[in-house]
Image (cartoon, rainbow, N blue to C red):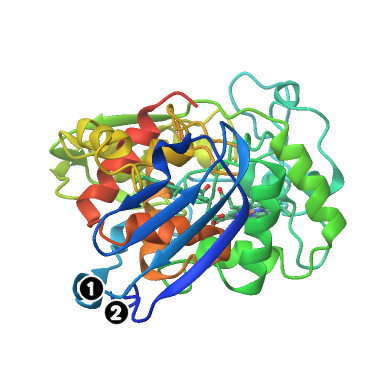
Amino acid sequence: MERQGATTLSRPSVRSFNSLILAVSCEVCFLSNGAYTLIAFPRTLAFVASLTIVAATTASAQTATTFTVPAWAFPNIAPALVAKPPFDSVAPIRVPRSAKVYTLAQVKNQFGPPDWHPATHPKAPDVVALGRRPTAWACGYCHLLDGQGRSENATLAGLSVEYITQQIADIRSGARHSALAGWGPSQNMTNVVKDITDDEVAIAAKYFASMKARQRYKVVESTKVPRTDEAGGLYAPKTDGTTEPLGARIIEVTTDLRRHEMRDAAETFISYVPPGSVARGQKLATSKTTPATSCTTCHGPALRGVGDVPPLAGRSPLYILRQLVGFRTGARAGDTGAPMQVVVANLGIDDMIAAAAYAGSLKP
Ligand code: HEC
Ligand code: HEC
């Protein structure tokens, strides 16, 4: 799928971001990387700063390379792979280290998803635990009740209230959508928030912001990966143990397909990345020579986020990659994302894989 010229800025555009909180000191006041000039006026650490980006027309901006959306980053919502009792069965379903028992219909209930480990989170508000018919599925159905999320959606635990609110606004307005048109998981998120109220958003945002992300993604560098099936927005290793070359991809698998399908937050993941990705990503993320685009400048030294700039550490590498692709292709075009559009303008897919691998390997 080719998005020709989607990232070419053909005329100068100036955008101001008042209230972008940057944890950078004034060393980053004036920077230039050729195609783009970024002028920041941050005052002191964690002060509300005003950041202005001037994306100027230059020869290199005009010839900006085309970017191909990588289909492997968007695994399909495939039919379930695990044998299960019929949907209306009363057969009890359990998962390890939980006293709870549900039927399959309860596990798949978008208006009251399972809460396997209630001790891991405060009591969830209705919007998170129950949702509201007909379209506002419970946030906890996908992002789980403790906000840890799953590979195909997003970790919400530890994001700021302001950032969560802004993203929902962008998804509702269409400023944010999937870089792969119509990708199931993103489409579902869009449907869920289409008639949500401001109060519901505020309650959900406060709840998820109050929680901490856990480390659930193990980044493994390898030339080979298990052969996999698409398994609901992520991959599951085939049971025959066969492998294939990884190439320039991230293949993210669940380590326990049954847990995944039972929506158990104790599930963990392996993200296979090409050899050398983590070191290359670290270099990119921390580069002192190009602080305008080095990730730590805005996302903090350990990539744990600063103010409303979201954390990246320990989050799904494949999710991070999808977002970088989204900024690169204009699928994430909200105003507050403008700094990111500048950051990714000159990144190739290998750089994105590396940055995602490094960020995902860090402790949240
Ligand atoms: C059907 C599953 C589903 C439900 C239910 C759901 N989401 Fe999402 N959500 C997603 C997916 C998938 C994404 C990633 C979308 C993308 O990047 O294209 C997402 C992304 C988000 C993001 C952006 C996260 C980030 O780091 O930028 C926020 C915030 C969010 N959801 C909040 C909510 C809230 C609040 C609710 C409940 C009102 C909710 N979601 C319900 C699937 C869901
Ligand atoms: C000039 C500041 C700045 C720099 C430098 C920067 N970011 Fe960002 N980043 C932001 C802001 C602001 C957002 C929130 C965007 C929005 O509101 O949509 C963001 C969002 C993101 C997101 C989306 C997170 C989510 O929860 O969906 C990813 C992924 C990301 N950045 C990765 C990176 C990487 C990787 C780098 C380095 C290559 C980087 N950023 C450098 C400011 C920056």
Q: Residue at x 60, y 40 (%)?
A: 263
Residue 315: percent from the left, percent from the top? 46, 37
Q: Is mark 1 within 8 Å of ligand 2?
A: no
Q: Residues within 10 Å of mark 2 (few under 14, many from 20)?
A: some
Q: In this image, 122 relative to 18: left or right? A: right
> For disc 2, does the CB lie below 8 Å from ligand 2?
no
Ligand 1, seen in the image, is in the quarter at bottom right
Q: Amino acid at mark 1?
A: Thr
Q: CA separation, marks 2 and 1?
A: 6 Å
Q: Determine whether the residue tagged by mark 2 lies in a helix, strand or loop.
A: loop
Q: Secondary structure at mark 1?
A: loop
Side of 279 relative to 362 (left or right): left
Q: Nearer the viewer, residue 6 or 141?
A: 6
Q: Is residue 212 above or below residue 209?
A: above
349 left or right, relative to 30: left
Compare residues 86 and 243 and report the one nearer the observer.
Answer: 243
Residue 107 figure quarter: top right
Q: Residue 197 in the image: x percent, y percent?
A: 84, 62
Residue at 39 percent of width and 76 percent of height: 12
Q: Earlier in the sequence, mark 2 or mark 1?
A: 2
Amino acid found under the numbered disc labelled 2: Gly
Q: Which mark is residue 66?
A: 1
| Residue 114, position as x, y percentages in the image | 71, 39
State the residue in front, 270 or 261.
270
User: In this view of the protein, which residue sits in the foreground, 360 or 50?
Assistant: 50
Residue 180 location, quadrant: bottom left
Query: On the picture, is 261 further left or further right than 19?
Result: left
Q: Are marks 2 and 1 in contact (CB under 8 Å)?
A: yes
Q: Dividing the image into 4 quarters, which one contains the N terminus?
A: bottom left
Q: Pointer 2: what residue?
A: 5
